[in-house]
Image (cartoon, rainbow, N blue to C red):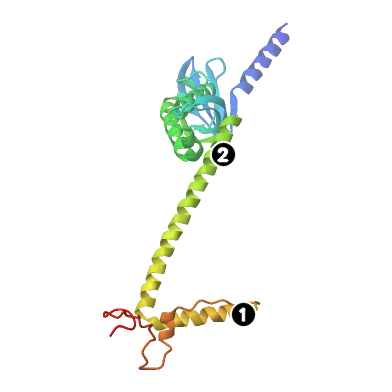
Amino acid sequence: MLMEFLGVLGALALFFLLGMFRVLREYERGVVFLLGRFWRVKGPGLVVIIPIVQQMVRVDLRTLVMDVPPQDVISRDNVSVKVNAVLYFRVIDPKHAIINVMNFLEATSQLAQTTLRSVLGQHELDEMLAARDRLNADIQAILDAQTEAWGIKVSNVELKHVDLNESMIRAIARQAEAERERRAKVIHAEGELQASHKLLEAAQILAAQPQALQLRYLQTLTEIAGEKSSTIVFPVPLDMLQGWLRPGAEPVHETPVQEDPGGGPGTD
C-alpha cells in the first residue's frame, strides 16, 4: 500500500516537474499571471512556470496578414461597389494585447471592416480607382490610432479589389473614350496653332528677303524631280519673275487705254 502511494506521489511530482518548464521561440512572448493577476512578460527561451499558481499565455510577435472580407460600400457619388483589402499588423505590447481586449485578432478584423466602409464611403469612385495610396494611408492611420490601446501596430493596409457591376464598367469605358477624343481634339488644335505661328514667322522672313522664296521654289523643284512623274505642274508667281530680269530693266505693265475727252472718232 505504501509503495503504491509513493508511486502515485512520484508520478504527480514528475507531472508537475515537467509542467514547470516551457520553451518560447524567438518570436514568442509569454504573459504570466500569478493567482489570476498579471505578473510579468517572459521569453524568449526557457521559462519556468509554477503549476496551479501561475498560468502563461503565448503571444506571437510576428507580422500577421489578415484578409478583410469584401465589403459593400456606397461611394459619395452613390455608386455601389464591393471592396476588399489586406491588413498587415503585429503585436508590440503582449500585456495590452491579452488584458485590454478579449480576442485581438477578431477585434482587429471587425474594426478593419467598419473602418473600410466608413472611409471609402466618404470618397467618390474615381478616388477609389486612382487615389488608392492616399486611401490606404488614411485607413492605416485610423486603424493604428484605434488599436494602439490593444498593443497592436498596424503597419500597412492595401486595397485589393474594387468590383463594379457591368453597367458601371460600360459607363466608365464610354467616359474614358470621350476623354480621349477630347484630348485628341485639343492636341490637334494646339498643333494647328503652333503651325500657324511658325508659318507666320516663315512668311515674315521670306517677305524680308525675296531671294529666299526663290531658293524655296528651287528646292521644291528638286524634290519633285525625284518622283516618277511625267508631268509636273508648278505655279510661279509673276513677282518672282521680276527678280530674274536683267538689272535696270523695268517690269512690263499693261498701259490702260484712255478715252478721248473731245468725243468719238472723226471729230475735229
Classify mark 1: helix, strand or loop. Answer: loop
Residue 229, how many percent across, how many down?
64, 77
The quadrant the N terminus occupies is top right
Compared across the picture, whether 103 is left or right of 144 comes to right
- Crowd tier of the residue under label 1, counting other residues whose Cα lies within 10 Å: few below 14, some 14–19, many 20 or above: few
- Crowd tier of the residue under label 2, counting other residues whose Cα lies within 10 Å: few below 14, some 14–19, many 20 or above: few
Residue at 56% across, 31% down:
168
Between 77 and 163, the one lying in front of the other is 77
Residue ID for mark 1: 226
Q: Which image quadrant is residue 174 in?
A: top right
Q: Say if residue 45 shows up in the picture.
A: no
Q: Amino acid at mark 2?
A: Ala
Residue 140, how many percent across, how many down?
45, 33
Residue 41, how many percent across, how many down?
48, 27
Q: Which mark is residue 153?
A: none
Residue at 50% across, 18% down:
102
> Is residue 145 positioned above or below 3 on the image?
below
Q: Residue furthest bottom?
A: 247
In front of the other: label 1 or label 2? 1
Residue ID for mark 2: 173
> Is residue 244 positioned above or below 101 on the image?
below
N-term-proximal mark, 1 vs 2: 2
Q: CA distance from mark 1 to mark 2?
A: 48 Å
Residue at 49% across, 40% down:
130
Between 221 and 257, the one lying in front of the other is 257
Q: Say if residue 113 shows up in the picture.
A: yes
Classify mark 2: helix, strand or loop. Answer: helix
